[in-house]
Image: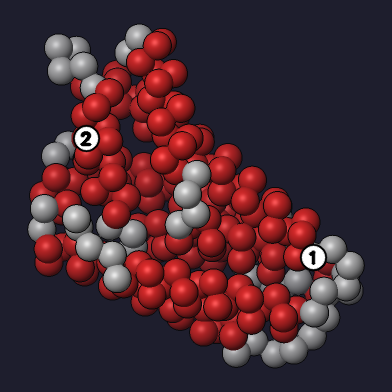
Amino acid sequence: MEFEVWLTYAVACLVLTATPGPSIFLGIVHSINYGLKRTIFTVLGDISANFIQMILVSIGLGLIIANSEFAFDIIKWLGAATLFYMGVKMLLAPTKSIDKKDDLEKVSNLRLYISGFMVAAGNPKAIVFFTAFFPQFIDTSQPLFPQMAIMCPTMALLDFTLVMLYAFSANKVLTTGKAKLHIINRISGGILVGASGALALTSRA
C-alpha cells in the first residue's frame, strides 16, 4: 500500500469513526464508573471484536452478513439487549458518593473486556461499514493480505485512540469534585439505554 493511499485511508477512518456510537458511549460510561485506566480493557474488547469483523470482511463472510437481513437482525438485537441490560443495571444501582478512588465499583478487568467486546460485536453496522469502506482503498492488482495487515491495525489504533479520548474527556468533566454516583449512574444508564434503542432501530440501508 502506497503511503499516500494509507494517509488518505487513515484520515477517512479518523473522520468516519469520530461520530459517537455504542462503543464510545460504553467507554464513556466505564471511564466514569470504573476509572479511566481500567477503561483500557473495555476498549481492548472493542477493538478485538472489530478485528474479528474486519477479518470476516477480508475473507468474504462480511458481505454475506451485510446482505443477510436475518444475520443482521440477530447481531443487532444481541447488541441492543447487551446495552439495554447494562443501562438498566446502572439506573437501578444504589445511591452513594464518589469521595475517593476506592469507592469506584469493583468489577473485574475481564468483565470490562467482555462488555466492550459484546457491544462492538453486537453492532452489525460495523460489518456493513467495513464491507463498503475497505474496497475503496484496496488495490485489486496487489495481494490482499499485506494491504489488510496495514488497514486493520490502522483502524484499530484510531478506534482505540478516539474511544479513550472521549472517555478521558467525560471522566474529567463528570468526576470533578465529589460527584454523586447515583447521578452519574442515571446519566450513564440513560445513555446506554438510549444507545440500545438507537441500535435496535438501525437498518442495513
In this orientation, does residue 119 appear? yes
67 up-or-down from 115: above or below: above
Badge 2 or badge 1: first in the primary sequence: 2
State the image quarter where residue 153 is shown.
top left
Which residue is located at x 55 percent, y 78 percent? 190
Kindly tell me whether residue 83 is visible in this rendering.
Answer: no
- Residue type, numbered disc 1: Thr
Q: Is 59 on the left or on the right of 16, as rendered?
A: left
Residue 177 vs residue 62, the one in the foreground = 177
Badge 2 amino acid: Ser
138 with respect to 190 (left or right): left
Residue at 54% x, 63% y: name it: 26
Q: Is residue 165 above or below residue 152?
A: below
Structural crowding at the residue carrying mark 2, measured as other residues with C-alpha within 10 Å and reported as few (<14), some (14–19) or many (≥20): some
Residue corresponding to mark 2: 58
Give the residue drawn at x 70%, y 90%.
94
In what element is the residue under mark 2? helix
- The residue that mark 1 highlights is 175
Q: Position of residue 32 (x, y in %)?
A: 70, 65
Tell which of 143 and 15 is nearer to you.
Answer: 15
Q: Position of residue 170 (x, y in %)?
A: 69, 58
Nearest the viewer among 19 and 180 is 19
- The relative height of residue 161 versus residue 45 in the rendered view (above or below) is above
